Image: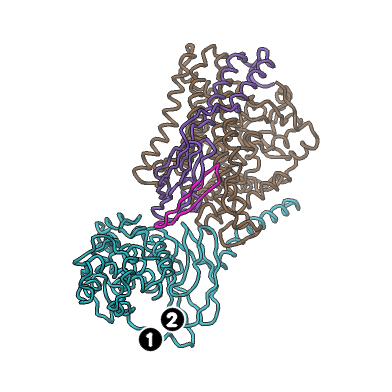
Chain colours: A brown, B cyan, C purple
């Protein structure tokens, strides 16, 4: 398995080490993010004509799930504007650390509590948003409140806790970006273990004059998976021995090692299940489901929410756990379940890509219209304000979804077989599970 | 603090401040009329002011579903008010007074309640005293029952009646003031008592009634009446007038809720011969103008002008009479 | 994962995939094309019926009856549409020449869940779905026969 070091290219390295390009992109995104909050708050309440809905749930979502995550893993996290205000307050600087450190030690940031040092909280936050998704995706004011809430939460956590506590332990988006980053063809790793072993101060983790210690609370020297590295490039800036590299690598290299973590395993099923539920509710012909999902607070919604949670937290993981039984070989069910659940990662990514293809291509024309009239006030900045709604590339959607879903299935089954071979047990039931889920998704989407 | 840091903070601050302030400022300077379904507030604002002779520019947007805008009793095309988009229209008024604007695309069961007013001030004299509607002049009790005691065995044919048209007895019946003040049944009764028509059968006399009705309108008027009916009435009364429009069931059960909806009823069956043949055009005009006093029937007085109402009425009778719009 | 005779395997599976995906299926002399009228009631936010099937070649007339606000009906894949106000039904007539399963969507903003107001028009058998299912099984078969899993080396360097 060959890796190509991207940072070996001097131009690439300079671009990544310099704070300017990243900061400029992040600053523009922050302005856009804040604009989206204002647009959702004072603009038209009609979702398809409001910048906040169109640019968050159609444009940004498309770029995230169809481009950023599959190609660069946590690349979005590198420029995400949400943690920035909190981080700037924490660091008291936008750029490199100031030469003198007039640190008032009066205020010492808290360490993130041990009990929450996992992704259960992130999964809960994601589920919370998912249960309200029908309202969230269609109501500008609600989107604005969620965006503002996340920004304020990140600021508050940035002031109270060390590093990027919001990003690592709370952000609902980060939960699945990290999981799917394991399938990405890009990674940040050290070049030589011995160099790190000989290094005494570990500025990559503690910070130095050149940069800050890893905001993601990761020790770069020990990075073996993409899940928690946010590609912020601080360690590349601080490492005095130039021992950290950004590599291009085969897709899914992280999936080789079966995970042992239960929180990540459950997250994979939450994502798989929610993709299937979204496909059924949002893209299916069943009005009953749509009404149940939209009318929050009614009995129908409680049933819907209950079914959502049951499917993602009980049914899918439960059936899957049974499928891992034949390969157990004396290990606990928990171990075999966690190990095989890595196969669900490429499957879930493929499900989300296939779902998003339809959702985005159908509604992409709203992007052009919203650029001309972001608040629905009657502007026509680029002449496209009155562009009629029209689904794009309809004939390509089904083939693209087929490629994604079948590709994801084959990838998932390959991962499962690899894990099965490792554990010396049969991966057939797990493969059957993946096949069944894929057939269901094909039926829902095509 | 170092220069780059200061610069970075400045630029960022400006960027974010602009992203917040610019839309808020521009929004505050944009005067929009918001259209919402009546249950969510209707037009907002719903009172506008204008001056005679000065153009009134309006920018309209919908906050939920498709709406439309028109001003009652003004000859103007209606403008669609689309969700999330802005439609511009310019109005000008020749006479002062209170005009009613209303929604022209069905937006729910309370669509007809979506109305507002334009107060137009100016030095021009207001319109001359308008005559009281015909039903008032005649002292008609439009809420009283008006079932026809006798109805034809089959739908009367205006074409058949035309063949008997050269009867001199008919001339008195063909005048508009007769047509407007008599129901088809009353007309039939009078024809029945005409000595010159005593050999004619009941059905033939009904055919003559149909012919009389037809001569008091034109095909264009019936077509326009049909258009107005489909746009304004069919949603409740049904495309064929049978009282079975898409909102009929909801209206029928609305009174169970009590309160303001206590009197709301199922829409009238306008295809029922007993009901319609016993109704004179004046009575129908009264119903349309005044509305149903809480029954759910809108009052169309501020919306349609007299000519439009007569056209709708002539269309209503086509549910009873065949070969009418020839 | 080592591929046993990887090139041969890839070629065989690739060819089979092309056949499954694109080979024209014998259009069984199915039912004669007929004229069909379907009355569709539209309300916030679904159609009733929401799924309907016709045969390929049928002349289909959809009568759109809105029950509450102005709704549209757009047929994905055919690119045709109509809209209807309550009280003013409209019809859309077309020949169902393209086989497959198509979504019908509302194309007049009719409230919050408007982008998700969706129904289904099935014209003949859903060949796209059948082919996709075929490809899934073919891929699995290819994996089973031509790819031997080996426990991969532990982690990157």
Tell me the element at label 2.
strand
Does C16 sit above or below residue A276? above
- Residue A407 relative to residue C61: left or right: right
Report how far apart the C-alphas of labels 2 and 1 lie in the structure.
12 Å
Residue nearest the observer in this picture, A261 or C32: C32
Q: Quadrant of the N terminus of chain A?
A: top right
Does A330 sit above or below residue C71? above
Residue B116: image tag: none
Residue nearest the observer in this picture, A339 or B168: B168
Tell me the element at label 1.
loop
Q: Count neighbours of disc 1 (C-alpha within 10 A) and say few if under 14, some if 14 to 19, many if 20 or more.
A: few
The residue located at (66%, 19%) in the rendering is: C10
The residue located at (35%, 55%) in the rendering is: B246
> In the image, which residues are magenta?
C74-93
Circle 2 sits on which residue?
Answer: B97
Residue C83 lies in the magenta stretch: yes
Does A371 sit above or below residue A169? below
Residue C103 lies in the magenta stretch: no
Residue B129: image tag: 1
Q: Is residue A407 visible?
A: no
Residue B87 placed where, x, y %? Answer: 54, 64
Does A328 sit above or below residue A170? above
Q: Which of the 4 quarters of the picture holds residue B253?
A: bottom left
């Amino acid at each position: 398995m060959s890796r190509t070091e991207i940072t070996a290219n001097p131009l690439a390295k300079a671009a990544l080490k310099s704070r300017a390009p990243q900061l400029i992109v992040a600053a523009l995104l922050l302005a856009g993010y804040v604009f989206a909050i204002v647009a959702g708050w004072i603009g038209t309440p009609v979702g398809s004509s409001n910048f906040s809905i169109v640019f968050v749930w159609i444009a940004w979502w498309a770029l995230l799930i169809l481009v950023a995550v599959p190609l660069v893993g946590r690349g979005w996290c590198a420029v995400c504007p949400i943690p920035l205000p909190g981080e700037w307050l924490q660091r008291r600087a936008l750029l490199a650390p100031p030469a003198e450190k007039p640190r008032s030690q009066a205020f010492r940031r808290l360490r993130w509590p041990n009990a929450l040092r996992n992704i259960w909280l992130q999964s809960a936050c994601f589920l919370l948003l998912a249960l309200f998704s029908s309202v969230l995706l269609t109501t500008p004011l609600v989107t604005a409140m969620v965006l503002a809430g996340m920004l304020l939460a990140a600021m508050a956590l940035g002031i109270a806790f060390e590093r990027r506590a919001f990003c690592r332990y709370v952000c609902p988006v980060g939960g699945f970006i990290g999981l799917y980053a394991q399938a990405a063809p890009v990674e940040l790793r050290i070049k030589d273990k011995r160099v790190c072993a000989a290094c005494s101060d570990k500025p990559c983790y503690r910070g130095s004059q050149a940069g800050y210690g890893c905001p993601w609370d990761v020790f770069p020297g020990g990075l073996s998976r993409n899940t928690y590295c946010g590609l912020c490039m601080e360690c590349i800036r601080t490492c005095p021995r130039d021992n950290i590299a950004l590599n291009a690598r085969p897709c899914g290299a992280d999936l080789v090692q079966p995970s042992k973590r239960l929180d990540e395993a459950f997250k994979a099923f939450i994502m798989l299940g929610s993709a299937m539920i979204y496909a059924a509710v949002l893209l299916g012909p069943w009005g009953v489901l749509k009404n149940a999902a939209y009318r929050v607070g009614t009995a129908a919604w409680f049933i819907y929410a209950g079914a959502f949670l049951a499917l993602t937290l009980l049914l899918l993981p439960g059936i899957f756990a049974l499928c891992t039984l034949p390969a157990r070989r004396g290990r606990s069910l928990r171990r075999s379940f966690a190990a095989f659940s890595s196969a669900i990662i490429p499957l879930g990514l493929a499900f989300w890509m296939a779902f998003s293809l339809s959702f985005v291509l159908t509604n992409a024309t709203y992007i052009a219209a919203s650029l001309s009239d972001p608040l629905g006030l009657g502007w026509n900045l680029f002449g496209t304000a009155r562009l009629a709604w029209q689904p794009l590339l309809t004939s390509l959607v089904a083939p693209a979804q087929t490629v994604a879903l079948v590709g994801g299935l084959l990838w998932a089954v390959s991962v499962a077989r690899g894990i099965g071979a490792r554990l010396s047990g049969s991966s057939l039931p797990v493969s059957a599970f993946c096949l069944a889920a894929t057939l269901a998704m094909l039926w829902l989407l095509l | 603090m170092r220069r780059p840091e200061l610069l970075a903070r400045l630029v960022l601050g400006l960027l974010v401040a602009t992203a917040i302030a610019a839309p808020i400022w521009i929004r505050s300077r944009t005067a929009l009329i918001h259209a919402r379904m009546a249950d969510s507030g209707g037009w907002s604002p719903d009172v506008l002011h204008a001056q005679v002779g000065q153009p009134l520019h309006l920018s309209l947007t919908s906050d939920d579903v498709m709406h439309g805008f028109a001003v009652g009793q003004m000859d103007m095309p209606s403008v669609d008010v689309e969700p999330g988009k802005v439609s511009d229209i310019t109005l000008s008024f020749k006479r002062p007074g209170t005009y009613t604007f209303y929604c022209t695309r069905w937006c729910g069961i309370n669509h007809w309640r979506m109305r507002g007013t334009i107060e137009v001030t100016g030095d021009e004299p207001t319109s001359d005293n308008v005559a009281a509607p015909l039903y008032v002049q005649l002292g008609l009790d439009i809420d009283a029952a008006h079932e026809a005691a006798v109805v034809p065995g089959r739908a009367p044919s205006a074409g058949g009646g035309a063949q008997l048209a050269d009867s001199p007895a008919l001339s008195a019946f063909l005048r508009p003031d007769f047509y407007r003040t008599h129901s088809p049944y009353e007309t039939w009764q009078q024809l029945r008592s005409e000595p010159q028509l005593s050999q004619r059968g009941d059905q033939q006399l009904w055919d003559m009634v149909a012919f009389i009705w037809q001569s008091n309108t034109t095909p264009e008027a019936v077509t326009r009446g049909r258009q107005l009916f489909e746009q304004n009435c069919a949603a409740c009364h049904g495309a064929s007038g049978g009282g079975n429009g898409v909102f009929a069931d909801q209206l029928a059960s609305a009174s169970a809720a009590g309160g303001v909806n206590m009197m709301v009823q199922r829409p009238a069956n306008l295809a029922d011969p007993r009901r319609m043949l016993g109704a004179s055009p004046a009575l129908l005009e009264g119903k349309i103008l005044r509305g149903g006093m809480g029954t759910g029937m809108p009052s169309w007085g501020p919306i349609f002008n007299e000519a439009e109402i007569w056209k709708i009425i002539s269309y209503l009778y086509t549910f009873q009479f065949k070969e009418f719009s020839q | 994962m080592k591929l046993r005779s990887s090139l041969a395997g890839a070629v065989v599976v690739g060819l089979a995939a092309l056949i499954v995906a694109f080979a024209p299926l014998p259009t069984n002399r199915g039912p004669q094309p007929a004229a069909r009228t379907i009355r569709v009631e539209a309300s916030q936010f679904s159609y009733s019926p929401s799924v309907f099937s016709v045969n390929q070649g049928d002349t289909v007339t959809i009568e759109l009856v809105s029950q509450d606000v102005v709704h549209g009906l757009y047929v994905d894949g055919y690119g045709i549409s109509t809209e209807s106000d309550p009280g003013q039904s409209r019809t859309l007539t077309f020949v169902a020449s393209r086989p497959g399963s198509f979504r019908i969507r509302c194309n007049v903003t009719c409230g919050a869940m408007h982008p998700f107001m969706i129904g289904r028009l099935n014209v003949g058998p859903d060949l796209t779905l059948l082919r996709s299912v075929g490809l899934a099984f073919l891929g699995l078969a290819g994996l089973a026969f031509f790819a031997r899993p080996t426990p991969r080396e532990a982690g990157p360097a």
